[in-house]
Amino acid sequence: QVQLVESGGALVQPGGSLRLSCAASGSIFSIYVMAWYRQAPGKQRDLVATITSGGSTNYADSVKGRFTISRDNAKNTMYLQMNSLKPEDTAVYYCNAEIVTTATPRRYRYWGQGTQVTVSS
């Protein structure tokens, strides 16, 4: 069994910063690509950023230069540093990870429960 738990969501003013965390736990053998997604009310879930186990990153155009994804492989934890936040960044942010457990050699994608980020004055 694997769990992904996000934290760090909050209400913040435009121009402010937040740092989200995603901690993976359970019978983990290895974690491959990790990613942050977000879903605003009434909209589809969109990819925000990805990071490989080797540290290669990719970002959605809408967050390039403002958000930074990182991970600590020793702690099975991923982060999203969000700066210069805008009202349009308001959404539920979800953690996603491609994981191989100790029970099977297959890779499965797991989701966290989400954390709310609200950018408003």
Image: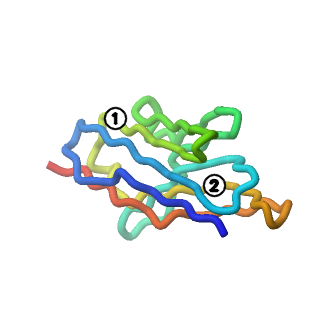
Tag 2 secondary structure: strand
User: What colouring style does the render use?
Assistant: rainbow
Q: Position of residue 121 (x, y in %)?
A: 14, 48
Which residue does the image show at 32% across and 42% down from the upper left?
A: 18
Q: Dot 2 corresponds to which residue?
A: 97
x then y, percent, for residue 40: 38, 62
| Label 1 CA crowd tier, 10 Å (few <14, some 14–19, many 20+) | some
Does 14 appear above or below 1? above
Q: Nearer the viewer, residue 26 or 6?
A: 26
Quarter-of-image position of residue 97: bottom right
Seen at 50% across and 62% down, the residue is 45
Q: Amino acid at mark 2?
A: Ala
Which mark is in front, 2 or 1? 2
Q: Amino acid at mark 1?
A: Asn
Task: Specify the quadrant of the image occupied by residue 67.
Answer: top left
Image mark for residue 67: none
Q: Quadrant of the N terminus?
A: bottom right
17 lies above or below 30: above
Residue placed at 45% from the left, 42% from the top?
80
Q: Secondary structure at mark 1?
A: loop
In the displayed structure, would residue 104 be above or below residue 67? Answer: below
Q: Which residue is mark 1?
A: 83
Whichever of callouts 2 and 1 sits on the residue coming sooner in the sequence is 1
Residue 32 screen position, x and y as percent: 71, 47
Give the residue at x 62% y 40%: 74
Query: Which x, y percent locates residue 35?
Result: 58, 49
Marks 2,1: beta carbons within 8 A: no
* C-alpha separation, residue under disc 2 versus residue under disc 1: 23 Å
Q: Residues within 10 Å of mark 2 (few under 14, many from 20)?
A: many
